Amino acid sequence: MSDTRILVIGACGQVGTELVEELAKRHGNERVIASDIRETANFDVEYVQLDVLDREATRKVMIDHNVTEVYQLAALLSATAEKNPEFGWKLNMDGLFSVLDLAKEGLIKKIFWPSSIAVFGPTTPRENTPQNTVIEPTTVYGISKFAGERWCEYYHNRWGVDVRSVRYPGLIGYKSLPGGGTTDYAVDIFHQALKTQTYECFLGPETSLPMMYMSDAVKATIDIMHAPAADIKIRSSYNLSAMSFNPAEIAREIQKHIPDFSISYEPDFRQAIADNWPASINDAEARSHWGWAHSYDLAKLVADMLENLKKQINVSA
Ligand code: SER
């Protein structure tokens, strides 16, 4: 482990922010480098500005910093990619190839790249969606993630690239904000519940989706990267699950803490995206191959989110 040098690309995003913090805790600040397209950012570890689409700049960062492992998180999420399909496809695919090709050359040893429940589409069984099933995504984001999964497996089979991936569900955390996904409501709702005790939801009350607390997602990400290579039997991407809920259910759970909280519904274009995604995920393979286990259910997640966001509001008040 002593020569491990980790680069997180897309470090300023929802996952990156928390992942950098946890990786630094485990490996030491000097072994982690955060990078993103922004000129500056506030991390306890070294930060470098990097556009992952600039292959030469990406290669230079790897060489200059002796990078051995990369977490490639830069992407346009589902809702944003629908607004800019061409760039969504470009960033999500070329961003992946940029790091896959450096690993193929032997410049980096290991890659993490996230896929998503968005790979599934209307023809996929909605409940308890298995690892191997019909996959016909209908969004640019889903198409790019599915294509990316196939390429990860291809680079592994053909050139031995050690790339590992999970299909994230909707992710919820208090340390960072989501950036343009269909599941963002499940983070926004907490901020609004504390600020105004009301929330207008862009998905309907019955729209059940797979979700996960950020600390579990970060744990899964680090666990799959630390697992022995032989345990990673799926080199496309693993189903990953913790809980499923709909907006009405999370609202009721919030009301247990904030009785005056009320929710209203104004579905927009994101409803159609959510309607084509699974309601729940079967992640038996991740659990048996590399020991994945989640800690947070809905009740625990809501209690923890509210407690931590209240603390943040008190600090900034
Ligand atoms: N949270 C993501 C999105 O909504 C799903 O991967 O786009």
Image (cartoon, rainbow, N blue to C red):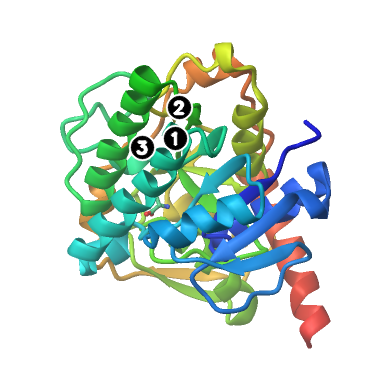
Label 2: state its secondary structure.
loop
Residue visible at 45% across and 27% down? 161
Q: Mark 1 points at which residue?
A: 105
Instruction: State whether residue 253 appears in this view.
Output: no
Q: Distance between the residues labelled 2 and 3?
A: 32 Å
Q: How far apart are marks 3 and 1 (CA)?
A: 40 Å
Crowding at label 2, few (<14), some or many (≥20) Cα neighbours within 10 Å?
Answer: many
Q: Dots 1 and 2: beta carbons under 8 Å?
A: no
Q: Dots 2 and 3: beta carbons under 8 Å?
A: no
Residue visible at 38% across and 22% down? 159
Q: Mark 3 points at which residue?
A: 279
Three-letter code, disc 2:
Val
Residue 3 on image: x %, y %: 76, 37
Label 2 vs 3, first from the N-terminus:
2
Looking at the image, residue 228 lies above or below residue 52: above
Three-letter code, disc 1:
Glu
Q: Name the residue under label 2.
A: 161
Residue 291 on image: x %, y %: 64, 18
Q: In this view, does 17 lie to the left or right of 86?
A: right
* Quarter occupied by the C terminus: bottom right
The one of 149 and 109 positioned closer to us in this rendering = 109
Residue visible at 56% across and 79% down? 39
Three-letter code, disc 3:
Ala
Residue 118 on image: x %, y %: 31, 43
Instruction: State whether residue 84 appears in this view.
Output: yes
Q: Residue furthest bottom?
A: 317
Residue visible at 80% across and 71% down? 311
